[in-house]
Each structure stands twice: as C-alpha cells, then as structure tokens.
Image: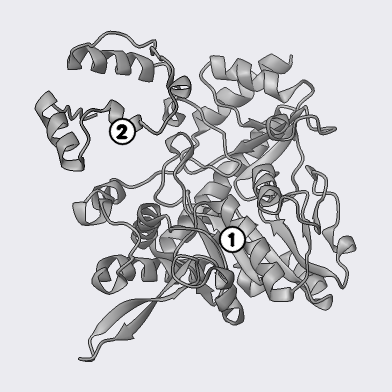
C-alpha cells in the first residue's frame, strides 16, 4: 500500500491555488454545531515495516479457500485461474482502462468487449450479448425490467429455486411496484412455476442448475411461457455448466443472465464479479448497458464502435433502458482471456471434470448415510442433515473444512431449511478433500 504524504508547503500551495486561506475555510458552509469535535481512536504513527507486520498478522487470521477442503458454492465458485490471466490483465493498458466514453479512440477496449460479447452469445445460445453487467444478481433484476418493457405487462414470477440473493436484488429493484411474486423455496425441486403463468404474465424467472443444484426442464417452461405471451428468463450462476449442458437459448429462453465469476475471476472475498446478459436479436433495443459492434472505417479498415448505449448519460433520461453506469471491464477481460485459453474443447473437459468430482462427492455422502436431495445436478447439490446445518458448518470451519452453505443463512426463518446444506465440488476438489469432509461430517452427526 503506497502512502503519498503532502508537506505543509504542498498543502499551502493547493490552498492558494483554489483561493482558500486555510483548510478550515473549506468547511465554512458546514455549521460548527455539526462539525463538533472528533478524536478518532487511532494508534500513533508507526514505521512502514511495523504496519506491514501488523497487516500480515491480521491476514493470517483469515482462512482462505485454498487453505483446506472447500465445498462452498451457491453463486461463487473456486476454480483454477491460469497465471496467464492475472499477468495479462495487469498490463497497464488494461489495468487503467475504463468505460470508453470516447469509444473511437479506445479500439483495444472495444475489441475486447466485442470478443467478450461473442463468447457470451455462443455460450448462452443467444443472438446478442451486452458488454457485461455488475454481477449476476443485478443482471437478473435488469432482465426482469427488460421483460416488462418488452411485454408491457407487470406480472413476474420468480422460481423457488432462484438464488435467494438474486431474488432479493430483484425485489429491491422493483421495490414499491406491483406484480412481482416470489415462489417459496424448493429445495427438493418441488413446486411448479408453470401453474402460475397466465395471460397477464410478463416473464417467469428460473435458474438452472438452481440454487439447490437441480437441473430444470427449460424447453417445457419456455413452451408454457410462450403459450401465454410471457418471456422465459434463465439464470445461470455456474457458467462452467454451459460447457456440458445445452445452451438455454437452444431450449427456448428469451433472455439469459449469468454470473461469469467462475472464468478468470477468483473468489476475492466476494467480488468484484461480472454479470452476463444475452437475448434474442428482436429484443436488443431494450437491452440495458452497452453493446459494442464491428464495422469498417473510411479506408475500409476493420474497426469497433459503441453501437448501442441506451443509458441516461448518453440519451434522454426518459428513453434510457437502465441507469447502469458502467460495465465490469477488467473482470470481463479476465473472463475473455480464460475462456480463450480453454477453447471449446477445454471448457467441455473442465465441465466434465467438475461433474465427475460432484458425482464422487455425492457417492461418498450417500455411502455415509447422508441424504442427497438431488436426482440431477452439475457440480452442486443439497443434503439434509439430521442436525442444524449452520452449527455443523461452524464446527467444521473450526477444523479447517469449509463445508458448504447452510440454506438457513440465506433463508432465515423459512420452514424446513434449517438442516439443509448446499455443497459444491469443482476441478480443485480432491479425493482427500471429500474424505475429510465426509468423515468429519459423520463424526459430528454421530
């Protein structure tokens, strides 16, 4: 961490430049009763090496994902990120780049976003993708608003298998508006959103694999929605799954949103991540964010442009599709580099490896007498323990095993979820990790 001090002469020069006689004069408009006196409880100045040692001691208190067996998923997954990704995104021309407000002079950034869009469209099986969103949850909320604009209807149903935090984000976006209905949690895949669709429905939102790990029949849901003039929004929190599962677009989805963290972006204690959004070409003008396109210049040379940017900074506020103010450029770049390194066959192999690790985990759990609720899954599943899952997770964490996510943490107070635990396995999950988890679980349950 760099510390850039200003001398007294520096500060006096800055004050003179702006025409202020003292620092206090900068706060002249603030009533003195509001300013009051404030004495922060901070330690005395320390030499740099002492501060570094203190920070290292604090860091050692953390238990990072790579420090032991790790089975946490639920929208944030531990995958191997090649060193090449980090090396390339830290080049100065990428690391300092921001949203292209003067796109014609940002050809490198625009080309990268164009390649990113192409990858996302191919992965999701859709016609067009935008230049990224903040994360999967906000992309989901934007997709709901987009569907309401397209259909000119307000009623939207959120599946009981949708990630609770994604659901809460949609609820926040639509706060105070009518028409949003959240179906109850469906940890065993129960509940049928089809029964709720009527002629006033704008869209239904499903997730596959869902929060509990179940795979959903996208084709049947798309057909049911389209019969009533509604749109199908499909959410994917584990983008690696599309290396093995058929693309939602090929199964009838109208809008696909996803979290792209699994490719190129480590967990990093919760972010930043990168949201993906793709749709049918006929809906492109209702797409939030921005879209980069390819063209030729006056000399016939290949070039890239900001084709659509329907946000309020660029057009009249009443015409804006969204107030999203930027794209997750650096995270999108990491995603693009990682997927380019894998290629189509590499992504398929990675997806198969994830699934095989999950099968090994499920087999070991069932052999130990622990009930797995899933009949189908990709790399994530839900188990029902005979005791409270949150208590078990805390106990195992103290033993160095991060044993998944208790459903009660995200669904507090909901019935029949206290004993449910969501577990994820990736290519980094070893046989030794699985054995440590299962044996320790057996001991705690006993």
The C terminus lies in quadrant: top right
Residue beneath the point at 68% across and 45% down: 168
- Residue at mark 2 to residue at mark 1: CA–CA distance: 46 Å
Residue beneath the point at 38% across and 13% down: 40
Q: Is residue 41 above or below residue 383?
A: above
For mark 1, what is the residue? 257
Q: Within 10 Å of the Cα at label 2, are there few (<14), some (14-19), or many (20+) other Cα atoms?
A: few
Secondary structure of residue under mark 2: helix
Q: Is residue 131 visible?
A: yes
Q: Is residue 29 left or right of residue 378?
A: left
Say whether disc 2 or disc 1 marks the residue closer to the N-terminus: 2
Residue beneath the point at 59% across and 60% down: 257
Say which of marks 2 and 1 sits in front: 2
Q: Position of residue 374 (x, y in %)?
A: 74, 45
Image quarter of residue 305? bottom left
Q: Position of residue 437 (x, y in %)?
A: 59, 25
For mark 2, what is the residue? 26
């Amino acid at each position: 961490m760099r510390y850039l001090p200003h001398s007294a002469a520096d500060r006096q020069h800055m004050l003179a430049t702006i025409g202020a006689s003292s620092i206090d004069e900068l706060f002249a408009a603030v009533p003195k009763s509001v300013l009051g006196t404030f004495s922060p409880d901070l330690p005395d100045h320390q030499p740099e090496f002492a501060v570094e040692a203190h920070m290292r001691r604090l860091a050692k208190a953390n238990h990072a994902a790579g420090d032991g067996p790790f089975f946490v998923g639920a929208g944030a997954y531990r995958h191997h990120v090649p060193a090449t990704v980090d090396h390339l995104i830290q080049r100065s021309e990428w690391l300092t780049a921001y949203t292209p407000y003067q796109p014609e002079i940002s050809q490198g950034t625009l080309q990268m976003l164009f390649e990113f869009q192409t990858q996302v469209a191919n992965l999701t099986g859709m016609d067009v993708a935008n230049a990224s969103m903040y994360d999967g949850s906000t992309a989901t909320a934007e997709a709901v608003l987009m569907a309401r604009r397209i259909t000119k209807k307000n009623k939207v149903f959120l599946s009981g298998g949708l990630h609770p935090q994604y659901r809460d984000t949609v609820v926040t976006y639509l706060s105070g508006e009518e028409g949003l209905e959240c179906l109850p949690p469906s940890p065993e895949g129960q509940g049928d959103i089809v029964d709720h669709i009527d002629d006033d429905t704008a869209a239904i939102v499903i997730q596959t694999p869902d929060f509990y790990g179940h795979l959903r029949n996208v084709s049947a849901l798309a057909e049911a929605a389209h019969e009533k003039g509604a749109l199908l929004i499909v959410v994917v929190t584990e983008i690696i799954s599309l290396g093995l599962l058929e693309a939602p677009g090929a199964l009838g989805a109208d809008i696909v949103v996803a979290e792209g963290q699994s490719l190129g972006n480590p967990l990093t204690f919760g972010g930043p991540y990168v949201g993906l959004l793709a749709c049918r070409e006929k809906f492109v003008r209702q797409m939030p964010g921005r879209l980069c396109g390819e063209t030729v210049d006056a000399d016939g040379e290949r070039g890239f442009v900001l084709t659509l940017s329907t946000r309020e900074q660029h057009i009249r506020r009443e015409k804006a599709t969204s107030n999203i103010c930027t794209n997750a450029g650096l995270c999108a770049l990491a995603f693009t580099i990682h997927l380019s390194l894998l290629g189509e066959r590499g992504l398929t192999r990675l997806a198969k490896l994830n699934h095989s690790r999950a099968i090994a985990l499920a087999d070991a759990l069932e052999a130990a007498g622990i009930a797995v609720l899933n009949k189908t899954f990709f790399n994530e599943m839900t188990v029902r323990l005979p005791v409270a899952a949150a208590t078990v997770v805390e106990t195992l964490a103290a033993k160095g095993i991060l044993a998944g996510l208790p459903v009660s943490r995200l669904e507090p107070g909901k019935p029949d979820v206290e004993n449910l635990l969501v577990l994820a396995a990736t290519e980094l999950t070893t046989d030794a990790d699985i054995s440590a988890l299962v044996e320790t679980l057996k001991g705690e349950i006993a």
